[in-house]
Image (spheres, rainbow, N blue to C red):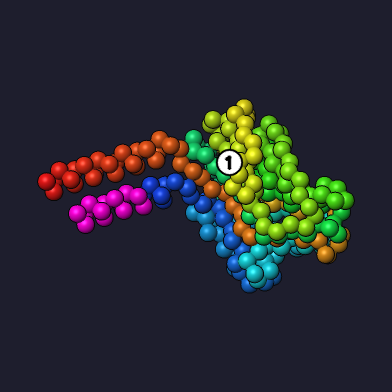
């Protein structure tokens, strides 16, 4: 009986491990002042790529967040950095673009943001691009007017959706779930599905990730805090079904053997 239970537990663990995987992921638990291009920054994803260089204004706060503070101007960072693991030698792109029939997600978990003193149009963009630099998926947080901010999403066919918030907000989670082969995209805020599309035209790959602090950002009092962010993959149902079926077969054999 104990051995049968142990097999069940093992197979449940296999199914769980196959259900989702972090490819590129940052939790920003480093000491204060670690910039995106600093060596101590930890990428806990299986690919573990590095960010490229590109100016100041994005650094950890020592309390578990990356803070984009008002330091003036636009700052752009890309993954993977040219000449490093997974990257081309001369460009900030994957040497072998990510592809396949699995479902991918990009997500940005905001710890808080205060855009009260920001200029209209000040924003942060986290996006996945294909190998030609064309948009695959986008998450945007932006000061939209004198009284409102927006969390925006977009996918390959520029299917924008936006949701209004106050200028000063606490934690929110924004995620785009997309399938390159099926042409689908779905937008989530705080775990709630907001909209979905079934007509996306993707090139069939992910060539890299980009984080942009866009706008004038002339007021130091403005900030956007990111608790964690990254790119993940969810194996297609056929893969999970194979694992479950395989597990069921083991259990059946084990039961007959014990009888």
Residue at horizontal 40 percent and vertical 39 percent from the top = 239
Looking at the rendering, the stretch of residues picked out in magenta corresponds to 1-13
Indicate the position of residue 229 as horizontal and vertical percent values.
61, 54
- Dominant SS of magenta comes to helix
Please name whichever residue, 155 or 251, is drawn nearer the observer in this view of the structure.
Answer: 251
Q: Quarter of the image holding residue 204?
A: top right
Query: What is the secondary structure assignment of the residue under circle 1?
Result: strand
Q: Look at the image and tell me in which quarter the N terminus lies.
A: bottom left
Extreme residue toward the left, this view: 259
Residue at horizontal 46 percent and vertical 41 percent from the top = 235
Please give the residue where the numbered disc 1 appears in the rendered image: 177
Q: Is residue 194 magenta?
A: no
Residue at horizontal 49 percent and vertical 38 percent from the top = 102
| Residue 193 visible | yes
Vertical position of residue 15 compared to residue 226: above or below = above
Q: Is residue 8 magenta?
A: yes
Binning the other alpha carbons within 10 Å of mark 1 as few (below 14), some (14 to 19) or many (20 upward) gives many
| Residue 74 visible | no
Indicate the position of residue 22 as horizontal and vertical percent values.
51, 52
Please name whichever residue, 149 or 43, is drawn nearer the observer in this view of the structure.
Answer: 149
Viewed as shown, does residue 164 lie left or right of 48?
Answer: right
Q: In the rendered picture of this protein, how many numbered marks are placed on residues?
A: 1
Indicate the position of residue 24 as horizontal and vertical percent values.
56, 53
Residue at horizontal 59 percent and vertical 58 percent from the top = 26
Q: Quarter of the image holding residue 77?
A: bottom right
Vertical position of residue 166 compared to residue 35: above or below = above
Viewed as shown, does residue 4 lie left or right of 11?
Answer: left
Indicate the position of residue 46 as horizontal and vertical percent values.
49, 54
Please name whichever residue, 97 or 155, is drawn nearer the observer in this view of the structure.
Answer: 155
């Amino acid at each position: 009986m104990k051995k049968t239970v142990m097999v069940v537990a093992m197979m449940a663990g296999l199914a769980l491990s196959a259900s989702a995987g972090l490819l590129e992921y940052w939790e920003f638990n480093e000491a204060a002042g670690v910039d995106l291009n600093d060596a101590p920054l930890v990428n806990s994803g299986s690919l573990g790529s590095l960010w490229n260089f590109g100016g100041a204004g994005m650094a950890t706060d020592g309390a578990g967040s990356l803070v984009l503070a008002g330091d003036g101007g636009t700052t752009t960072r890309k993954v993977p950095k040219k000449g490093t693991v997974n990257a081309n030698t001369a460009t900030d792109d994957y040497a072998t673009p990510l592809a396949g029939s699995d479902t991918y997600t990009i997500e940005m978990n905001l710890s808080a943001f205060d855009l009260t003193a920001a200029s209209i149009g000040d924003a942060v963009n986290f996006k996945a691009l294909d190998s030609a630099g064309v948009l695959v998926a986008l998450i945007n947080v932006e000061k939209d007017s004198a009284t409102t901010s927006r969390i925006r999403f977009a996918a390959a066919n520029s299917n924008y959706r936006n949701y209004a918030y106050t200028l000063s907000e606490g934690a929110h989670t924004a995620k785009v779930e997309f399938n390159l082969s099926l042409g689908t995209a779905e937008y989530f805020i705080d775990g709630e599905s907001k909209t979905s599309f079934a007509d996306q035209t993707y090139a069939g790959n992910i060539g890299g990730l980009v984080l942009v602090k866009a706008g004038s950002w002339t007021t130091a009092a403005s900030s956007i805090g990111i608790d964690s962010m990254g790119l993940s993959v969810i194996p297609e149902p056929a893969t999970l079904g194979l694992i479950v079926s395989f597990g069921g077969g083991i259990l059946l054999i084990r039961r007959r053997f014990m009888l």
